[in-house]
Image (cartoon, grey):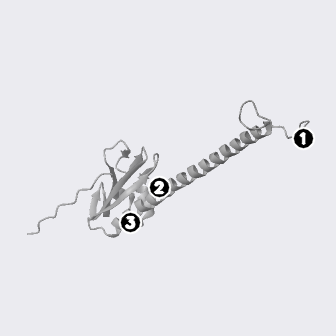
């Protein structure tokens, strides 16, 4: 109060209308909001990462289920599993398919793939995935096939991203 009993008015030279403690409070609030935004971003990235992991796990399950479907109907029909997401650095071998299904030897499973840069096929027994890819996998199991010196009761082909040609019907006349 001044000498006349009136309240004095304080005007900041900057025209901000804030005193020193108000400016410190605004800075503190800005830091809190930045930390909160960062926390929310970390949560969102974690959820996105988890969704990708689930998609990959579902795709691997569908990859082997497609093989089982084909093996359970070894009549030469082609089974297709579409839109499978395969991770870079993963490998799938004839032994892995053998291990998931009883009654077929790994020598009786052929692995094939398209000529894309995403795949590397080794001796028709292993496919290495070089980059994350969404692809279709084709399966075909048929009875009786000679592999080397062994006779396969059922012979299967698993083809990554490359369609399997249907066998032509033989004329029985």
Depth check: give the residue in front, 172 or 51. Answer: 51
Instruction: Name which residue lies at 71% across and 33% down.
Output: 15
Report the side of 50 relative to 106 (left or right). Answer: right
**Disc 1: CA contacts within 10 A as few (<14), some (14-19) or many (>=20):** few
Mark 3, secondary structure of its residue: helix
**Disc 2: CA contacts within 10 A as few (<14), some (14-19) or many (>=20):** some
Residue holding disc 3: 68
What is the number of the mark on residue 56?
Answer: 2
- Dots 1, 2 in contact, CB < 8 A: no
Report the side of 56 relative to 82 (left or right). Answer: right
The residue lying furthest to the left in this view is: 173
Mark 2, secondary structure of its residue: helix
Total numbered labels placed on residues in the image: 3
Residue 102 in the image: state x and y as whole percent: 42, 67
Residue 23 in the image: state x and y as whole percent: 75, 38
Q: Earlier in the sequence, mark 2 or mark 3?
A: 2
Mark 1, secondary structure of its residue: loop
Q: Nearer the viewer, mark 1 or mark 3?
A: 1
Residue holding disc 1: 5
């Amino acid at each position: 109060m001044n000498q006349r009993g009136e309240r004095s008015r304080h005007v900041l030279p900057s025209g901000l209308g804030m005193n020193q403690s108000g400016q410190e409070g605004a800075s503190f609030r800005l830091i809190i909001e930045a930390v909160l935004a960062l926390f929310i971003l970390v949560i969102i990235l974690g959820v996105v990462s988890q969704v990708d992991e689930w998609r990959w796990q579902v795709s691997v399950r569908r990859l082997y289920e497609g093989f089982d479907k084909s093996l359970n109907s070894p009549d030469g029909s082609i089974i297709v599993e579409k839109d499978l997401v395969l991770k870079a650095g993963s490998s799938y071998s004839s032994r892995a398919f053998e291990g998931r299904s009883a009654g077929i030897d790994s020598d009786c499973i052929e692995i094939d793939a398209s000529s894309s840069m995403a795949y590397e096929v080794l001796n028709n027994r292993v496919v290495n995935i070089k980059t994350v890819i969404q692809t279709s996998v084709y399966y075909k199991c048929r009875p009786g096939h000679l592999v080397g010196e062994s006779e396969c009761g059922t012979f299967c082909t698993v083809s990554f991203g490359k369609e399997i040609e249907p066998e032509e019907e033989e004329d029985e006349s």
